[in-house]
Amino acid sequence: MEPAETPSHERSTEIASNLGEVQAAVEHSQKVQSRLVAVSKYKPGSDIMAAYNLGQRHFGENYVQELCEKSAALPADIKWHFIGRLQSNKCKALAGIPNLWAVETIDSAAKAHKMNDAWRNAGNQNQLNVFVQVNTSEEQNKGGVEKSDVESVVQEIIGSCAGLCLKGLMTIGSIEGSQKRPNPDFLALVALRDELKHSIGVDLELSMGMSDDFEHALELGATNVRVGSKIFGARPTKENAQQN
Ligand SMILES: *Cc1c(COP(=O)(O)O)cnc(C)c1O
C-alpha cells in the first residue's frame, strides 16, 4: 500500500471510535439485518483504510471520477456504492469498476437501461445491484423517480435489464422532513415498498438514513444506511478537497 494510504495512529483511533459507535447502533437495531455504508466522499484513501482495517467493507461515493481513482488504489474486496446523481455519460466509467457493488441512484427507466448496457458491455458476468431512487419529498430539484412512476421503473428493471439486480428503493428526503419524527420521507419509502410487495410480489430493501437520522431510519426498517460525517468527521468543501 502507498504510504499516502496509511492512516496516522491518531486518525485511526478517531475513526475507530466513531465507526465503532455507528456499527454498534446498526447491529443493535434488531428489527432487520442492516448494512452500513460508510460514505467517504472528499475523504482521503487513508481514512478509508482506517475503516477498512476495522472490518468495514461497504463504502459510498458521490463522484464518478473520485470513485474511479479510489477504487483503483484501494483493496479489491471493498464493495463500492455509487450514491451520487447518475449521469448517462458516466455509466461507462462506473461499469469499469469491477468491485462496484451497487448504484443506489437509478432515477429513470432510461438510466437503468444505460447502466445495464454499460455494465454488460464492460464484460461483467455478475449482476450489478441497483436501487431506485425515489423523490419521496416531491421537491422540484430533488433527484429521483416520482412516486407514481416507481412501479413502472421497477418493472422495467426486472423485465428487461438482465445485467441488473434490483435490490431496493432509496431516498434522501427533504431537510424539513429529516427534522420530523417520524420522518415522512422514510414513511413514504416504507409505504412504497409495501405496495410493491403487494402489487408485483417483489421484496425490496430500503436505503434511507444518514448521520443525523440513521438510527431513526433503522427503527422504521432501513436495511441500508449511508453514514459519512458521523464516521469521518465534517467534510471539506469541494474546492478544498480538490487541492489535496
Ligand atoms: C453525503 C451523503 C450521505 C452521507 O451524509 P452524512 O450526513 O455525512 O452522513 C448519505 N447519502 C447521500 C446520498 C449523500 O450524498
Image (cartoon, rainbow, N blue to C red):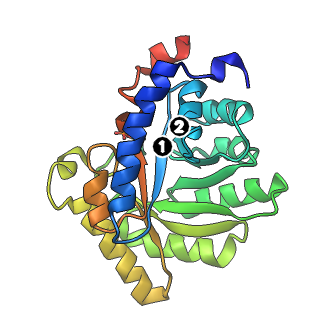
The residues bearing labels 1 and 2 have C-alpha atoms spaced at a distance of: 8 Å
Name the amino acid, label 1.
Ala
Q: Residue at x 42, y 64 (%)?
A: 223
Would you identify the image quadrant in which residue 170 lies? bottom left
Name the amino acid, label 2.
Ala
Q: Nearer the viewer, residue 51 or 189?
A: 51
Q: Residue at x 68, y 74 (%)?
A: 160
Q: Residue at x 34, y 61 (%)?
A: 28
Q: Is residue 14 visible?
A: yes
Query: Where does the N terminus fall, quadrant-wise?
Result: top right
Q: Ligand 1 sits in which quadrant?
A: top left
Residue 198 screen position, x and y as percent = 40, 88
Q: Against 76, is 184 above or below?
A: below
Q: Are the residues flagged by discs 1 and 2 in contact, CB closer than 8 Å?
A: yes
Seen as rendered, the residue at the extreme top is: 243
Seen as rendered, the residue at the extreme left is: 180
Q: Which residue is mark 2?
A: 51
The answer to whether mark 2 is within 8 Å of ligand 1 is no
Q: Is residue 138 visible?
A: no
Q: Which residue is mark 1?
A: 38
